[in-house]
Amino acid sequence: MFTFILVSSLFLLWGFLNGMIDVMDKHFQDELGLSKAQSAWVQFAHYLGYFLMALPASILATKIGYKGAIIMGLLLVAAGGFSFIPATYVNSLVHQGAVTPNTAFVAFLAGVCIIATGLTFLETVANPYTTVLGSKRYAATRINLAQACNGVGWPLGPIVGSMFFYSKDAAGNSTGSETLYIPYVSCAVLVLILAVIFYFASVPDIKTSDDYHLDNSTPGSSHSIWRHPHFVFAVVAQFLYVAAQAGIFSFFINYMTAELPAIPASWQAGMERFAANAGILQGWLTGWFHSTAPGVIALSDKGAANLASVGFIFFLTGRFSGAGLLRRYSAHKILGLYGLANVLMTFIVFLKLGWISVLCVFLSYFFMSIMFPTIFALGIFGLGARAKKASGFIVMAIMGGAILPKLMGFVADEWDMSRGFAVPMVCFIFVAFYGFNWSKFSKAESMHSVSVTGGH
């Protein structure tokens, strides 16, 4: 239990860091004059780190064990956090004309990528580790509970991001470029402390069960993980799921600032009155709305960034409720139903049905909640010692988050943000397909019934 709680703290960490990443795009669009597709380089740099480091992380985890790989990941995250200090200095040179905005952008992207390489170690190790810390009957439940800590950290990221990325001085000028490094450096310090705790903690290396006889020479058994369809399709499903997630998360602010129906002026007045009596929360509550024309009220970037936290609350609620459902029902069936639900949600957003579509954006967060950990658990099911290697490939599939958001941004640039939701809709169709067909791919009834009909 102590080990599980300690490992779950890692999920909280990368949830917070991912939450900040997801509200960074609009900052660079405004500060550096980037299009939506160009700002998606933030996601590209983030998920490129996963792609480059996933296999090395899985290989190293096999050699030095879970504990060593976790500490290595924490040190890389710290290095990435501290790299935001020189990146901020480079950005200050833009105003002096010494460097171009693209140079500053690349400096920040480098820090994002380094942090992602560290998070890759943590995800490659922590995800499969949670599945073996107890009965395999509840493997999907444990990984979803641990990922719920991810969901706790994710709502905090946009709140902190709105404070530092979209901050303004007394004259109303943006100071986000000067303060963007603060939360990252703070995280770097905390991560170093966490690395010391892991160094002295007991983190035993546990071998997973070998349901497919990959670890022996049983006649007729397959020693390659690529001969197992439930794993292969999990890689594809994870690629497309993370692609959909990254697109929706990263363009949330763009959607909320551009696609919301007309906002009543009474909302702004009510928020201002509430903020005036909110004490220490006053700074957070002010600046949610702004006037785009006489009598026209719209949600500001800061307001949308804060509203992203509401989306992540839906996400967190889905994680906790989903963990309960996975204790009672087959994991692959829940995944299929949630995937189908998100096909419907994104289609309604695509149709531009006013506030109904806005609600469906938040509901899409809810139905995405269990997808990553459940695909992960279903993909490594029964792979024995090869689970670490399989984990590396599934984490590598996170590269989908680097590629598809650029396509979603392109569609939004050509048409509008609502039409861009057609991209994640296609992704969710495949996730639903994988969920409903996992039993056929794995030749197992469910993760509750772990008997397997021999090697295949």
Image (tube, rainbow, N blue to C red):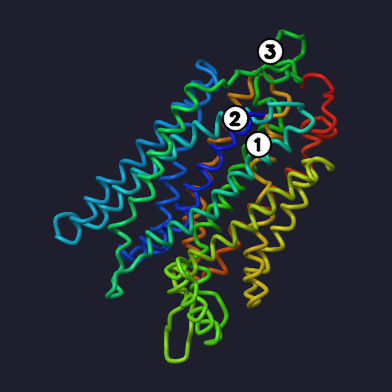
Q: In this view, does 294 lie above or below 398?
A: below
Of badges 1 and 3, the one in the foreground is 1
Q: Image quarter for residue 204?
A: top right
Residue in the picture at 44% in, 68% down: 302
Residue in the picture at 24% in, 54% down: 91
Residue in the picture at 53% in, 23% down: 201
In what element is the residue under mark 2? helix
Q: Image quarter for residue 390?
A: top right
Q: Which mark is residue 215?
A: 3
Residue 71 lies, in percent from the top left, at: 46, 26
Amino acid type indicated by mark 1:
Phe
Label 1 – label 3 distance at C-alpha:
20 Å
Q: Residue 239 carries which label?
A: none
Pointer 1 or 2: first along the chain: 1
Amino acid type indicated by mark 3:
Asp
Pointer 3 or 2: first along the chain: 3
In what element is the residue under mark 1? helix
Label 1 – label 2 distance at C-alpha:
8 Å
Position of the C terminus, as image quadrant, is top right
Residue in the picture at 49% in, 76% down: 277
Q: Mark 2: few, some, or many residues within 10 Å (few <14, many ≥20)?
A: many
Pointer 1 or 3: first along the chain: 3
Residue 388 lies, in percent from the top left, at: 59, 24
Residue 425 visible here:
no
Tell me the residue that label 2 is attached to.
391
Disc 1 + disc 2, Cβ < 8 Å: yes
Q: Mark 1: few, some, or many residues within 10 Å (few <14, many ≥20)?
A: many
